[in-house]
Every structure is written in C-alpha cells, then in structure tokens.
Image: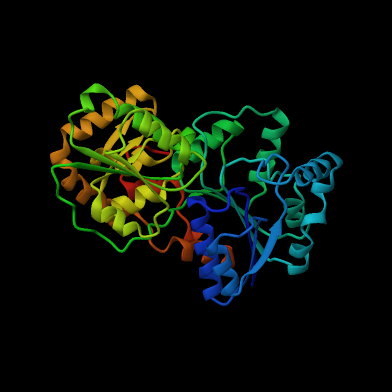
C-alpha cells in the first residue's frame, strides 16, 4: 500500500517528529511504500535522511511565508502564492499526485496551524479521490485561539472530514473542542514513544540533581523562570545542580541569564544529548515547567528510567505524573518557586516516587504505538487505537469522558 506522511512542523526536528517517523519505519518494515513530505530544510534532519535510506520517498515543500529563516525572495514568493490562490493548487504537490497515495497521515506540531486547512490542496485531493486522511496532533495551547471565525470553521470541516484525529494528550483534545466549539467525534489518544531501555539505577547523592530536557525555547519550555526561581535567597546555600539538555534559539540568552544570576557553578548547559540514558544515570528529577504541552517524550523517558518530575498542569503532564511527582498549577515564577522548594524539602522521596513512575509506564504506556498506528492506517481499522475513555482508564485517571 502507498502511504503519505506529512509533517507540518516548520522546525527541522523536534519531539513532535518522532512518532510519525517511527510510524514510517514500521510501515517500511512491513513492505509498504511510504512518501514523507517535509519542509525544505538544508540540511534535512538525519532521521529523515535515514528514512530515505530505508526506502521512503522524500517530498520537500517550500516554507510558508511566515517562517523567517528563509531568503526574502522565498518569503515573497510564498506570500504571492498564498494571496493569488496558487497554494490551493497542485503546484507544490506534483510529486504527491504522481505517488498516488492510498492513505494519508498529517502530523502537526500544533493542533490547528496555518499550514493545513480544509481548503488546502492536499485535503481537497484526498476528498476528491476518496483517500482517508488522518490528523495527528502533538501539541495544543492552553487557551482559545486568536483567529477569525472562518479559520475555526475551516478547521472544523478539516476535522469532521478526517478518518480519525489522533491526539497525544487527552487535555489537548478537550481544549481543541473548546477552540472549535464542538465535539470531535472520531478522536483517539495515542502515546508518544519512550526511547529508553528501562529502569536505571538511581544516582544517590546529597546534591539535588535536576535536569531539563527540552528545546531551548524559554517562552514555551520555561527555562528562564526556573533559573530565576533558583536565584532567590533561599536557594543560595542549597546544594543543587541543574543540567539543561537541548538546543534552540535561546541558548545565548539562557547562558547570559545564568551568568547574570551568578549561577554558572550550579547550572550547566550541555546542548543536545543523544544518549538519553546517560542523562538519567546522572540526574534525579526532571523539570518540565512548560507553558503548554502535548505529552512530552522527555517526561515519558524520565518516568520509564525511574525518575519523578516537577511539571506544570498543562497537556497530560499532571495526568501521567499524578501523585508520584510535583505539579505546579502554572509556569509562573511564583508557582514554580513553590513546587521546586517542595521537591527539595521532599528530596528523600524522589527515588521511591521514581519507582512508581516507572510502574506507571509499564502498565499504561503503549510501547508498540507506532506499529498500532501503522496497522490502523493500512487496515483502516480504529480497533488499533484507544478512545479517550480507554486512555484514561489505562492511566487510572479520575477524569471521566
């Protein structure tokens, strides 16, 4: 079978790209023909190049006009296509038309973005040729959208004509319904992968060793507020370390902030770390103070390794961590200050909390999610997917649908 997988994320790579790329690998391993459609990054992410080496056909699209990391003439041309209606034609999708997909999976870094709408060529092509398309949402904001009614109506039609809408977070789904003002009928909740072997020995130490594993984008991921909270007087004599792992546009800013607070000896920026297990062999607790989330791969990996977490009540972070971690109601400085101090005061509980987190992953996390999604796509059978209530039951949550 010929299956097209489209990523609408304008960044080169991120946690939101892992699940769909795993699905592509699973489909290739089963002998299916796969086309991967991504934006025209130079160079492409290694993972995408690896898919090509395994047999996937690559379709590279030009960036939308609102992306700033492209030449001026490219932005101007993209804007012209948008305003003239060329964007709704097959102009940028000829390779896809020639491929003749039988199934389409569209993975979005946000639930409703400006890349794919009901009026997009790809959606109209699917509807005209009776090709089932499935939406995969990796993230949603914690609020409604500042958009026009036309935008909402377009995304409503996009969702209602989809074969299914997959979310990595129950809360993202419910917020999406608020954003549209209607129930999403064919919604399912899927698990992001946790690429770690299993429980790792807890690094016993008198020093509180904390880790943030996230792209360096403080507006969303909250690194600056954590650094600010740890700069206050009550932390001055506390023996702690904070290790930042990741890359992103805020690297220099965060380094400057650490220097500003004179925390260079306690807060270390490591950059992107490929070996996730090495992170958790050296750290005791994950900090995930996000302003918004889906379900973070970093959280699932930390829990699988046997580490607890300090999280904000966004996405499904609190639903996964429950009483086995520390939950801040928001990522404000005041909320984070309180929850970080509580984690320090209860430092003696971190190892046991981490063991309980590991058990949660063992019982509630679907380790073969990419295979199940691949089988769903091929067989067009939603029995491979979890409806929202089943997802909550697996987590033993207290929320009912």
Residue 11: image x %, image y %?
Answer: 58, 48
Relative to 87, is 192 on the left or the right?
Answer: left
Image quadrant assignment for residue 260? top left
Image side of residue 190 versus residue 156, left or right: left
Q: Which residue is rendered at x = 42% and y = 33% of the image?
A: 256
Q: Residue at x 30, y 58 (%)?
A: 278
* Percent x, y of residue 52: 60, 70
Q: Is residue 221 above or below residue 331?
A: below
Q: Is residue 108 above or below residue 218?
A: below
Residue at the right extreme of this rendering? 84
Between 7 and 364, the one nearer to me in the picture: 7
Q: Which of the 4 image quarters holds residue 242?
A: top left
Identify the residue at image location x=28%, y=51%. Answer: 360
On screen, residue 287 above or below 130? above
Q: Place residue 182 in its image quadrant.
A: top right
Q: Is residue 222 visible?
A: no
On the rendered image, what quadrant is the N terminus found in?
bottom right
Q: Position of residue 104 (x, y in %)?
A: 65, 59
Q: Is residue 330 above or below residue 132?
A: above
Q: Is residue 122 left or right of residue 342?
A: right
The answer to which of 73 and 350 lies nearer the viewer is 73
Q: Is residue 90 left or right of residue 288?
A: right
Residue 29 appears in the figure: yes
The image shows residue 111 at horizontal and vertical percentages of 57, 42
* Render colour scheme: rainbow
Quadrant showing the C terminus: top left
Q: How many marks?
A: 0
Q: What residue is shown at x 77% (from left), y 51% (from top)?
A: 121
Instruction: Please name whichever residue, 261 or 286, is drawn nearer the observer in this view of the structure.
Output: 261
């Amino acid at each position: 079978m010929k299956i097209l997988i489209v990523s609408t994320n304008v960044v080169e790579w991120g946690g939101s790209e892992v699940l769909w790329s795993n699905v592509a690998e699973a489909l290739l391993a089963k002998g299916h023909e796969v086309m991967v459609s991504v934006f025209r990054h130079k160079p492409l992410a290694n993972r995408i190049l690896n898919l090509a080496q395994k047999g996937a056909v690559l379709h590279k699209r030009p960036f939308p006009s609102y992306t700033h990391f492209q030449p001026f003439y490219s932005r101007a041309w993209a804007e012209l296509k948008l305003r003239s209606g060329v964007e709704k034609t097959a102009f940028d999708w000829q390779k896809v038309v020639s491929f003749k997909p039988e199934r389409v999976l569209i993975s979005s870094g946000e639930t409703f973005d400006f890349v794919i709408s009901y009026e997009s060529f790809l959606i109209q092509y699917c509807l005209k040729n009776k090709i089932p398309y499935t939406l995969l949402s990796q993230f949603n904001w914690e609020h409604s959208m500042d958009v026009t009614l036309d935008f909402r109506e377009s995304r409503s039609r996009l969702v209602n004509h989809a074969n299914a809408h997959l979310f990595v977070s129950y809360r993202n789904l419910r917020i999406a319904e608020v954003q549209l003002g209607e129930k999403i009928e064919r919604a399912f909740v899927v698990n992001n992968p946790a690429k770690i072997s299993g429980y790792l020995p807890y690094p016993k130490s008198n020093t509180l060793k904390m880790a943030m594993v996230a792209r360096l984008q403080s507006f969303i991921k909250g690194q600056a507020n954590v650094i600010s909270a740890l700069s206050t007087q009550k932390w001055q004599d506390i023996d702690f370390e904070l290790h930042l792992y990741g890359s992103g546009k805020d690297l220099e800013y965060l380094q400057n902030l650490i220097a500003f607070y004179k925390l260079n000896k306690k807060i270390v920026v490591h950059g992107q770390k490929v070996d996730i297990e090495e992170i958790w062999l050296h750290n005791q607790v994950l900090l995930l103070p996000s302003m918004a989330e889906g379900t973070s791969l970093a959280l699932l990996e930390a829990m699988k390794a046997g580490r607890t977490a300090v999280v904000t009540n966004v996405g499904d972070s609190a639903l996964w961590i429950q009483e086995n971690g520390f939950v801040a109601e928001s990522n404000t400085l005041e909320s984070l200050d309180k929850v970080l101090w509580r984690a320090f005061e209860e430092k003696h509980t971190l190892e046991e909390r981490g063991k309980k987190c590991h058990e949660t992953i063992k019982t509630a996390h679907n380790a073969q999610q990419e295979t199940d999604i691949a089988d769903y796509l091929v067989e067009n059978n939603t029995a491979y997917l979890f409806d929202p209530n089943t997802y909550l039951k697996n987590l033993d949550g207290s929320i009912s649908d």
